[in-house]
Amino acid sequence: MSSVIDWPALENAAIDVRTRAYAPFSQYRVGASILTKSGKIVVGCNVENSTYGATICAERSAIVNMVSQGREELLACVVASRAPGAATPCGVCRQVMAEFAERLPIVAIGLDEAGAVVERAAYDLETLLPHAFRLRSTP
């Protein structure tokens, strides 16, 4: 189990995967990286669709990748997008994150046109999504 969060590695992974986003409609490329309980960094990027409703955000893309690789608990998340501002995960992504983590530190970074970090903001999932819906089955 990983107890130390390597934030620079998570940021670099999110920035790198952002370049592979499929965003022909909005041109708004987002990359996300998550750290799993075993210490693995898993990435995802946004993939747009012409119907918009079928678009998947970077954060959910990373979580889907994590699940397909063996479903683990999330320990940390970084989201990278183009400035202005460091964009936080959308409401749907926040709810999906809550499915895999009770508490989750999230860093949002805003990048300039050259890809340099111009803003960094830290949050906790509980702050971004107070009173998250959780349906737990009982044995």
Image (cartoon, rainbow, N blue to C red):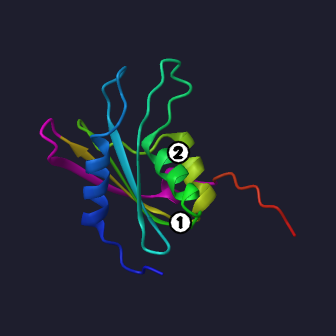
119 vs 8: above or below: above
Residue 131: x and y in percent read: 64, 54
37 with respect to 114 (left or right): right
Mark nearest the camera among 2 and 1 is 2
Q: Position of residue 5 (x, y in %)?
A: 35, 73
Query: Of marks 2 and 1, which one's residue comes earlier in the chain?
Result: 2
**Residue indicated by mark 2:** 93
Near-viewer residue (73 or 106):
73
Q: Residue furthest right?
A: 139
Give yes or no for residue 124 being in the magenta stretch: yes
Number of numbered callouts drawn: 2
Helix, strand or loop under label 2: helix
Where disc 1 sits, the SS reads loop
| Residue 72 is a magenta residue | no
Give the Cα separation between the discs numbered 2 and 1: 14 Å
Foreground: 135 or 46? 46
Amino acid type indicated by mark 1: Arg
Per the image, the residue denoted by label 1 is 103
| Amino acid residing under circle 2 | Cys
| Residue 129 visible | no
Tell me what residue is drawn at x 36 percent, y 28 percent: 23
Quarter of the image with the C terminus in it: bottom right
Q: Residues within 10 Å of mark 1 (few under 14, many from 20)?
A: some
Query: Could you say which disc has been placed on residue 21 in the image?
Result: none
Left of 69 or right of it: where is 22? left
Q: Can you name the residue that lies furthest to the front here?
A: 69
Q: Which residues fall within the magenta stretch?
A: 112-131
Q: Is residue 96 visible?
A: yes
Name the spot of residue 87 as percent of width and height, x first: 35, 42
Q: What percent of the width, then of the height, locates residue 97?
A: 55, 54
Find residue 121 and report its image quarter.
bottom left
